[in-house]
């Protein structure tokens, strides 16, 4: 299982997993990567345009993708755990 540490996970939650000033608990999120898939509806397209008056080149990239859960809605693929003491190595 891969472990990814993120600065976007709060470290100021109370024991119920809700923000509360002065608290030091955090949470963790577990996701089954095999429960999700992404598909390509349109492959990557690059286009460029030369703007002569300003001596610039404009580059635009477009792609159409989709990200979906593979299992029925009754089958969990993500879990959240809270009431974890932050800063413990």
Image (cartoon, rainbow, N blue to C red):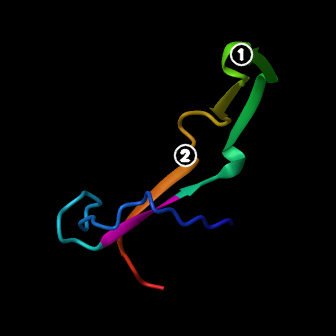
Q: Is residue 23 magenta?
A: no
- With 67 as the anchor, is 50 left or right in this view? right
- With 31 as the anchor, is 88 left or right in this view? left
Of the two numbered discs 1 and 2 on the same chain, state the one appearing first in sequence: 1
Residue occupying image coordinates x 74% and y 14%: 52
Q: Return the residue nearer the eye: 50 or 41.
A: 50
Residue occupying image coordinates x 23% and y 66%: 14
Residue occupying image coordinates x 36% and y 61%: 10
Residue occupying image coordinates x 28% and y 74%: 24
Whether 68 is drawn above or below 86: the answer is above
Q: Which mark is residue 82?
A: none
Q: Quadrant of residue 70?
A: top right
Q: Main secondary structure of the magenta part?
A: strand
Q: How many marks?
A: 2
Element type where label 2 sits in the image: loop
- With 23 as the anchor, is 25 left or right in this view? right
Is mark 1 in CB contact (under 8 Å) with mark 2?
A: no
Q: Return the residue nearer the eye: 4 or 63.
A: 63
Quadrant occupied by the N terminus: bottom right
Element type where label 1 sits in the image: strand
Give the mark toward the camera: 1 or 2: 1
Cα–Cα span, label 1 and label 2: 51 Å
Whether 87 is drawn above or below 81: the answer is below
Q: Quadrant of residue 12?
A: bottom left
Q: Is residue 28 magenta?
A: yes
Q: Which residue is mark 1?
A: 51
Residue 23 is situated, as x and y percent measured from the top left of the image, at: 22, 71
Q: Which residue is mark 2?
A: 76
Q: Quadrant of residue 40?
A: top right
Magenta residues, start to end:
25-29
């Amino acid at each position: 299982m891969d472990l990814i540490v993120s600065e976007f996970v709060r470290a100021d939650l109370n024991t119920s997993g809700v923000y509360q000033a002065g608290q030091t608990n955090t949470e963790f999120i577990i996701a089954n990567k095999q429960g999700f898939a992404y598909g390509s509806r349109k492959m990557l397209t690059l286009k460029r345009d030369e703007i002569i008056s300003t001596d610039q080149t404009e580059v635009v990239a477009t792609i159409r993708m989709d990200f979906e859960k593979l299992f029925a809605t009754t089958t969990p693929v993500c879990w959240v755990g809270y009431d974890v003491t932050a800063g413990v190595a």
